[in-house]
Image (cartoon, helix red, strand yellow):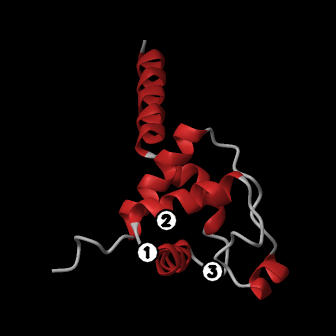
């Protein structure tokens, strides 16, 4: 009986931990943590080039669906050294969800007092 209770508790605990992680954490951060150029810097490059939320998000979706050096905000030297990102395997809805989380994490709009 005790073993069953412990087993059920462990299953509940594991499912709770999985629920706490979002699509951005599990699909973006996991790889970008290992890169020399962090996601915050990439965010600001997108913001400098596209300037508003809608444009940034559309550019990110386009790039992640079909990465190429013409649409990358990274320098040619960077892409030559580190290559381009692989095409995202996320479906459209999950990709938008991850980008929304990314936007909320790094945007400064409405956060500066």
Question: Which numbered disc, 1 or 3, marks the residue that appears first in the sequence?
Answer: 3
Across and down, in percent, residue 29 comes to: 57, 61
Is residue 93 toward the left or the right of residue 86 in the image? left
Mark 1 — residue?
51
Residue at image location 48% in from the left, 79% down from the top:
44
Question: Which numbered disc, 2 or 1, marks the residue that appears first in the sequence?
Answer: 1
Query: In the rendered view, would you say 19 is above or below 109?
Result: above
Front-most of residues 4 and 57:
57
Q: Dividing the image into 4 quarters, which one contains the N terminus? A: top left
Spatial CA distance of label 1 from label 3 is 20 Å
Residue at image location 48% in from the left, 19% down from the top:
3
What is the secondary structure assignment of the residue under circle 1?
A: loop
What is the secondary structure assignment of the residue under circle 2?
A: helix
Across and down, in percent, residue 76 comes to: 77, 84
Mark 2 — residue?
56
Front-most of residues 4 and 82:
82
Across and down, in percent, residue 55 comes to: 48, 63
Mark 3 — residue?
37
Residue at image location 57% in from the left, 76% down from the top:
38
Is residue 82 toward the left or the right of residue 39 in the image? right
What is the secondary structure assignment of the residue under circle 3?
A: loop
Front-most of residues 111 and 3:
111
Query: In the rendered view, would you say 102 is above or below 3?
Result: below
Query: In the rendered view, would you say 62 is above or below 70?
Result: above
Q: Which mark is residue 112?
A: none
Q: Nearer the viewer, mark 1 or mark 3?
A: 1
Mark 3 residue crowding within 10 angstroms, few (<14) / some (14–19) / many (20+): few
Residue at image location 50% in from the left, 51% down from the top:
98
Query: Answer yes or no: do the residues labelled 2 and 1 have beta carbons within 8 Å?
Result: yes
Question: Which numbered disc, 3 or 2, marks the residue that appears first in the sequence?
Answer: 3
């Amino acid at each position: 009986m005790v073993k069953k209770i412990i087993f059920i508790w462990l299953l509940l605990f594991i499912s709770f931990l999985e629920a706490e992680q979002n699509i951005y954490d599990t699909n973006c951060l996991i790889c970008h943590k290992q890169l020399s150029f962090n996601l915050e810097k990439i965010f600001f490059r997108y913001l400098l080039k596209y300037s508003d939320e809608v444009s940034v998000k559309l550019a990110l979706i386009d790039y992640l669906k079909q990465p190429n050096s013409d649409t990358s905000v990274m320098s040619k030297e960077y892409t030559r050294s580190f290559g381009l990102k692989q095409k995202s395997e996320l479906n459209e809805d999950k990709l938008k969800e991850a980008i929304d989380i990314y936007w909320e994490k790094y945007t400064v709009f409405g956060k500066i007092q």
